[in-house]
Amino acid sequence: NSGHYHKGKKPDAYMAKMIDLFTNANEIVIDPFLGSGTTLFVCETMGRICIGAERDFDYFKMIVNKYLAQCPEQNLQKLTPTLATLHI
């Protein structure tokens, strides 16, 4: 986990295709195994709401750091509910 790489990472384009096929803008996508956070980031770019969980704290930290780096316009108050759903 320390290498910031998740062996089960799905390509963004694949996840975008699945999310586009099965959801509309502003709908909720549930990912009970966030892993590297691909679903979360694709939902962010496609206007979907992602609710997910990740039990591995190293992956959780990787997702949070990646999210903060890619979404700097997000303020901490908005991010806090998201963080609560990421790590169980």
Image: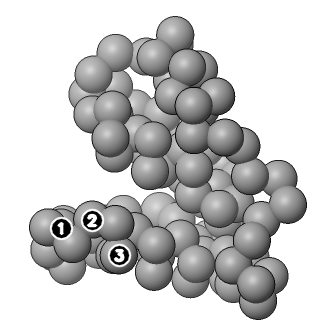
Work out whether 3 lies above or below 53.
below
Local SS, label 3? helix
Residue type, numbered disc 3: Ala
Q: Is residue 51 shown to the viewer in this render?
A: no
Query: Which is closer to the viewer, label 1 or label 2?
Result: 2
Residue type, numbered disc 2: Cys
Measured as percent of width and height from the top left, residue 9 is found at 74, 52
Q: In the picture, which quadrant includes the N terminus?
A: bottom right
Left-right relation of 18 to 33? left
Residue bearing the label numbered 2: 71
Q: Identify which residue is drawn at 57% across, 31% down.
A: 13
Query: Which is closer to the viewer, label 3 or label 1?
Result: 3
Work out whether 79 lies above or below 43.
below
How far apart are the two marked residues, 3 and 1, measured between alpha carbons? 10 Å
Residue bearing the label numbered 1: 74
Measured as percent of width and height from the top left, residue 28 is found at 40, 32
Q: Specify the label residue 23 is tagged with.
A: none
Left-right relation of 79 to 60? left
